């Protein structure tokens, strides 16, 4: 990369989601202006899916980030198109509009396709399904239905939203004083949030028990008809309505290998097996946990491998998964981490205070600070680990957060008094970022102020 008369090497990133944006920022951190990057996606916006679980309950608003701004912020060329094939011999990406793009390195981050699996259920895969769940919530509020089941599929998915939907529903019916509503969660996982370890499982069991939510783990739903869910091991649950998370499948691209369920096989540096120079990250790759935080870690590993391949002096680090999850409960969020600390040794933590900063639901090394910078919550360039409370007497995160929350609310109220509603809403978004969600009164205030933004 030392010859300045040559064209810079060209990296194509296929996708406009979590792994694509993390990969783009990571490449810029590693190679700065030494590469030209094309971001290829049919999407207009990066849609932040995790908070969509709270939208049906009126607790948050859709969050979208225009991809032309994301690309411009990171000196990438945005190409609105779908990647339909990869010609590895020629080093070309073939687009749906007939064009071809040459690449020196390719990062495939096209995500997975949600697939409905339970006839009669409302499938919830994020923002596009909010309306159907909201309609169910209205039926609950009106007393037209009295029991709802929340089902996770037997195939690959990210199960955390199924618990969040049930917990947020219980907080909602609590607010509307509908104590007669019966809520049930059914999941094939051996324990709730099994991937986070036993303390997290116990925490979810306690939360559900306190809220009167029936929990059936180690259980698959086999069918739903006439208001009855048939389960395996054999049992029946009565449910006036069912909300099911979809299972995820890969969307194969011609010229790329695809394994079971259409996912792309990669090595520990996220290099696509058998195709030098081609990398893949995120839900599209053959890895059993489909989560945004892990998608960013795969993208970081791929970006390092690409930088090294293009001549940067670094030793690329392999993908070593570290799970970070923020569970919305309808009261304060719970922060969960789990990861390997060496061969055969797994460590996990659970805390009411953030275990990373900024405390976002998709805990990407570069993505989280970048998105947080849009609501002015963080000036840091990278995600930082935070100790669990008790490990450090020097910090009191709860007091620290309370102070920031108090100040942000003060600024919000003052801005609203002056009629500066856009800024007032921005301050409320800072509080939402801190707390995971706004409380119902603050959510109502935001809706009111948002409607007044000129
Ligand atoms: C309701 C819900 C809640 C969630 N909560 C959390 C959470 O709390 N924490 C967490 O870490 N994760 C969470 N997740 C999971 C997380 O959203 C995904 O794991 C993550 O988005 C995967 O990132 P990705 O980049 O692989 O795919 P995506 O983010 O899905 O992005 C795929 C991108 O590729 C584009 N694309 C698709 N096909 C092509 C093509 N052929 N050519 C070019 N572009 C293409 C799409 O338009 C899109 O821009 C949640 C998911 C859901 C549905």
Image: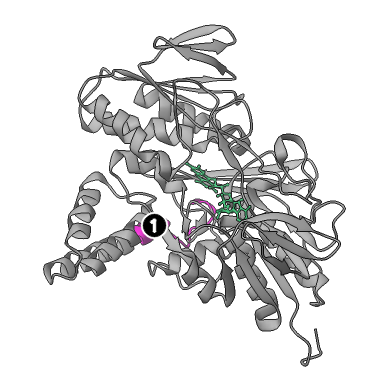
Q: Is residue 56 visible?
A: yes
**Where is residue 180 shown, x and y percent of the image?**
26, 17
Splitting the image into 4 quarters, where does residue 425 fall?
bottom left
Q: Main secondary structure of the magenta part?
A: loop
The residue under label 1 is 433
Between residues 66 and 418, which one lies in front from this camera angle? 66
Give percent across and percent down for residue 452. 16, 62
Quadrant location, the C terminus: bottom left
Residue 294, position as x, y percentages in the image = 63, 50
Q: Residue at x 36, y 59 (%)?
A: 401
Mark 1 residue crowding within 10 angstroms, few (<14) / some (14–19) / many (20+): some
* Residue shown at 30% from the left, 50% from the top: 438
Q: Residue furthest front?
A: 98
**Position of residue 219 in the picture relative to residue 250 (left or right):** left
Q: Quadrant of the N terminus?
A: bottom right
Q: Tell me which residue sits at (41%, 68%) in the image.
A: 374
Give the magenta-colored segment's residue range: 388-402
Decide: is 442 above or below 345. below
Q: Please determine whether, in this image, residue 216 is positioned above or below residue 352.
A: above
Q: Is residue 9 left or right of residue 379?
A: right
Can residue 359 be seen here? The reply is no
Q: Is residue 175 above or below residue 420?
A: above
In this view, the residue in front, 59 or 240, is 240
**Badge 1 element:** helix
Residue under the image location 73 percent in, 52 percent down:
320
In terms of image quadrants, where is residue 347? top right
Q: Give x and y (percent) for residue 350.
A: 52, 43
* Residue 289 found in image quarter: top right
Looking at this view, is 111 or 216 the one in front?
111
């Amino acid at each position: 990369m030392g010859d300045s008369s040559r064209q810079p090497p060209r990296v194509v990133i296929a996708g406009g989601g979590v792994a694509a944006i993390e990969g783009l920022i990571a490449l810029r951190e590693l190679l700065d202006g030494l590469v030209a990057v094309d971001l290829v996606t049919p999407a207009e916006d990066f849609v932040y899916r995790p908070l969509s679980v709270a939208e049906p309950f009126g607790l948050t608003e859709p969050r979208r980030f225009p991809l032309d701004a994301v690309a411009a912020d990171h000196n990438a060329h945005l190409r609105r198109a779908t990647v339909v094939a990869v010609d590895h011999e020629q080093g070309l990406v073939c687009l749906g509009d007939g064009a071809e793009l040459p690449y020196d390195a390719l990062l495939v981050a096209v995500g997975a396709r949600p697939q409905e699996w339970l006839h009669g259920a409302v499938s919830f895969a994020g923002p596009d399904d909010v309306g159907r769940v909201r309609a169910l919530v209205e039926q609950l509020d009106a007393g037209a239905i009295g029991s709802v089941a929340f089902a996770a599929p037997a195939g690959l998915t990210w199960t955390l939203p199924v618990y969040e939907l049930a917990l947020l529903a219980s907080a909602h019916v609590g607010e509307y004083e509908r104590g007669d509503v019966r809520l049930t969660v059914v999941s094939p996982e051996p324990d709730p949030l099994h991937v986070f370890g036993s303390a997290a499982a116990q925490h979810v069991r306690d939360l559900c028990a306190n809220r009167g939510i029936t929990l059936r783990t180690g259980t698959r739903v086999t069918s739903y008809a006439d208001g009855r869910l048939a389960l395996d091991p054999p049992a029946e649950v009565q449910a006036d309505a069912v909300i099911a998370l979809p299972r995820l499948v890969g969307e194969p691209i011609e010229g790329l290998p695809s394994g079971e369920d259409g996912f792309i096989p990669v090595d520990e540096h996220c290099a696509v097996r058998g195709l030098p120079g081609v990398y893949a990250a995120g839900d599209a790759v053959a890895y059993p946990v489909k989560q945004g935080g892990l998608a960013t870690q795969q993208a970081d590993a791929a970006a390092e491998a690409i930088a090294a391949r293009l001549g940067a002096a670094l030793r690329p680090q392999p993908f070593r998964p570290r799970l970070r999850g923020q569970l919305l409960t309808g009261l304060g969020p719970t922060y969960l981490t789990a990861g390997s600390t060496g061969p055969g040794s797994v460590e996990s933590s659970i805390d009411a205070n953030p275990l990373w900063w900024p405390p976002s639901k998709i805990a990407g090394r570069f993505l989280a600070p970048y998105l947080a910078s849009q609501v002015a919550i963080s000036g840091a360039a990278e995600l930082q680990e935070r100790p669990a409370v008790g490990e450090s007497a020097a910090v009191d995160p709860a007091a620290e957060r309370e102070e920031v929350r108090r100040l942000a609310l003060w600024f919000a109220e003052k801005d609203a008094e002056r009629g500066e509603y856009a800024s007032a809403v921005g301050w409320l978004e800072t509080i939402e970022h801190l707390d995971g969600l706004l409380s119902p009164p603050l959510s109502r205030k935001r809706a009111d102020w948002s409607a007044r933004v000129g």
